[in-house]
Image (spheres, grey):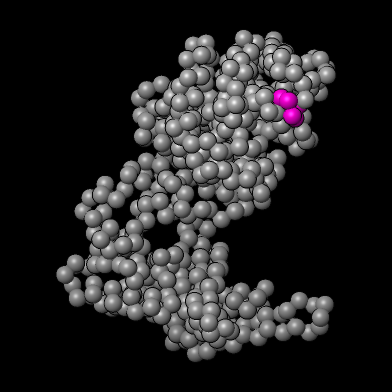
Amino acid sequence: MKKNVAIYDTTLRDGTQAEGITFSVMDKIKIAEKLDTIGVSYVEGGWPGSNPKDMEFFELARKRKFKNTRIAAFGSTRRAKVPVQDDDNIRKLLESGAPTTTIFGKSWLLHVNDVLRISPDKNLEIIADSCAFLRDNGKEVVFDAEHFFDGYDDNPKYATAALLKACENGASTVVLCDTNGGMISSRIKEVCSTVRKALPENVILGIHCHNDSGMAVANSIAAVEAGAMHVQGTVNGFGERCGNANICSIIPCIELKLGMKCIGPEHLRHIKELSLFVFEMANLAPDKRLPYVGDSAFAHKGGMHVNAVSKNPHTFEHIVPELVGNRRRVLVSDLSGRSNIMMKIAEHNLNLDEKSPEVSDILNTLKKMENEGYEFEAADASFHLLAKKILKKHKSFFSLDGFRVIVEKRSKNEKCISEATVKLDVKGEKELTAAEGDGPVNALDHALRKALTRFYPEIAKVQLSDFKVRIIDGKDGTAAKTRVLIESSDGKETWGTVGVSENIIEASWEALVDAVEFQLHRKQ
């Protein structure tokens, strides 16, 4: 591999500026530790001068040992009328105890004149004082040149002077920021290449991109190609407005496309795990369509595509999924061909010859059911049971004699009460149970598992972890068909099931039964 590229993560600061994103102090500590385990060079913990939570993070971080990561504290250059040694923001950077301090300063004359309202020379003096003071106090200094590319387009001489002033006074890394996120890759590469030549050789060039034009990752890679060896971004691209450059895409691009090292192949295979972890900490559903790490990144649906991938994965996959901790998925739908079915059958360990008539039976049944509103892409367990039934390998563990669901509201101020009664035939015995729940489906779920647990203790651990309802054809109003997708878990694995009916309770029952039967087939 070529030279190392330092990854500087700012999820805990810039990422939290995104709409709907917030982390507790302990959340931030856990994310920092996770980033450390996969070899990220820097983790920016926050702005200690802005709020008590960030200062608490630095206090806790000082008590922990980070193996691969340097903790960075973020702040601004000193205020114009305050000596650097008396500036509260600068003092808080020192008090944070972080070994690296990252300060941003103005490099665009528009901001110098209209926002700071000081002279250009005074701005350069502020940059110099701030960097020198932090360096003299033993800190590694990273200088973020805010709005650099806009400033460079406006006045390249002044924007470059701001960088050189930081270098002369202790900044070991200078970062060119596309703060407004409006640049395109060709311009980023051109400017970075020119600036790299103007900087002292011992100073590291960095890049910080926002995604307002949808080019943050591409622009970051263009900067690396032009000599940037320090890349700033966030996990999953979290950030203000349209977000920051996504390090979960940047890291694989650097390692697998440019042949440069930033975290190493041993850590690269945990990048999907990192993405999911941060989504969980942010209490957000993972984005399936993220490059490299999304569940759909290596999912194949079209019959011709699946046929090609079954023969040679390189035909429709730009990398081996396992390199980034992902996996290939074959989706089954009304677009499926025989190759989809065969790969899916193999995935579920069901032995079937490709020339067997059952392949056509499964395919035709699948297409018929999808036409009726079923969807098996997120319902692998329902597909597994469907295939077993057609192959005559399905075992029925119980049969339904009937169920009833009651929803009652006794007064305006009381919440609804839901109760379900289920009558089953299990191993020749009649089982009648009732249970309450937070809603009708929850009550039905409790009643079903309550009826079965005596006979099949292994289902006690099965929990409904997600529940989605989709109206298939809205033109029929409240009489429209409803598709219910249920995700279940036993604490270790998850599986999806589907049910369809004009009645939402019946559709939910169908998906619930599949969820339980799939677990019983797996365990028995």
Q: Quadrant of residue 133?
A: top right
Estimate the x, y position of residue 390 in percent, counting from the top left.
29, 78
Query: Up-down: is 511 above or below 275?
Result: below
Q: Residue at x 81, y 83 (%)?
A: 411
Left or right, residue 265 beside residue 483: left
Query: Residue 108 is drawn in which quadrant?
Result: top right
Question: Residue 33's x, y, as percent?
Answer: 58, 35
Per the image, is 353 magenta?
Answer: no
Residue drawn 51% across and 69% down?
486
Residue 393 shows up from this direction: no
Q: Is residue 114 magenta?
A: yes
Q: Residue 323 at x, y = what percent?
A: 37, 41
Which secondary structure class fits the magenta region best?
A: helix
Residue 27 x, y percent position in the rendering? 65, 43
Residue under the point 51% across and 44% down = 214
* Magenta part of the chain: 112-116
Front one among 239 and 419: 239
**Residue situated furthest bottom in the rendering:** 401
Tell me, yes or no, if residue 219 can be seen here: yes
- The residue depicted at 45 percent of the width and 85 percent of the height is 399
Describe residue 156's horizontal placement relative to residue 89 as left or right: left
Tell me the quarter of the image containing the N terminus.
top left
Front residue of 321/427: it is: 321
Q: Quadrant of the C terminus?
A: bottom left
Q: Nearer the viewer, residue 237 or 474?
A: 474
